[in-house]
Amino acid sequence: MVDYLESHARRIYSYASRPDLDGAKSIVAKIRSGKLATTFKARDVYRAGWSGLSTPEETWPAIRLLVEYGYLLEIEDKDTGGRPSQTFIAHPSIKEVA
């Protein structure tokens, strides 16, 4: 019984220790509410100062997770004269609330 309960406890705690997942959920919620445009840059997110997304270190893992799962499309612009710039486009299904 202890092993069974321990496996469930580990699963629950893994969700609590995933700030990237919480950040990804927040980004989706901001897009759905219209507070974040469907085309944006990472700096648009952390400059807004939203809880859990107020720094690049908090924002980038959340964005990477959304890109990995196909919720965001990453477009890289190399013709900036400096470091390449990334723009993200939200998948249309994000705006659809089930």
Image (cartoon, helix red, strand yellow):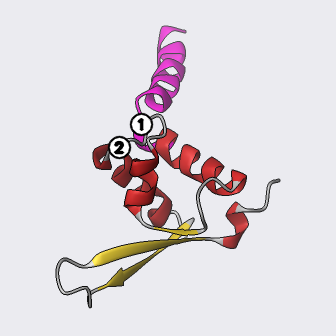
Label of residue 19 in the image? 1
The amino acid type, in three-letter code, at marker 2 is: Glu
Reply yes or no: does residue 2 show up in magenta. Answer: yes
Examine the rendering and report whether any part of residue 6 can be seen. yes
Q: Position of residue 70 (x, y in %)?
A: 54, 68
**Element at badge 1?**
helix
The furthest residue to the left: 82
Residue 79, quarter of picture: bottom left
Q: Which residues make up the magenta segment?
A: 1-21
The answer to whether 93 appears left or right of 30 in the picture is right
Q: Nearer the viewer, residue 3 or 70?
A: 70
Neighbor class of circle 2 (other Cα within 10 Å; few <14, some 14-19, many 20+) is some
Q: Earlier in the sequence, mark 1 or mark 2?
A: 1
Reply yes or no: does residue 28 show up in magenta. Answer: no
The answer to whether 50 appears left or right of 97 in the picture is left
Cβ–Cβ under 8 Å for marks 1 and 2: yes
Main secondary structure type of the part rendered in magenta:
helix
What is the spatial separation of the Cα atoms under label 1 and label 2, in whole angstroms?
8 Å
The structure residue drawn at horizontal position 58% and vertical position 57%, both measured from the top left corner, is: 36
Q: Position of residue 93 (x, y in %)?
A: 71, 67
**Element at badge 2?**
helix
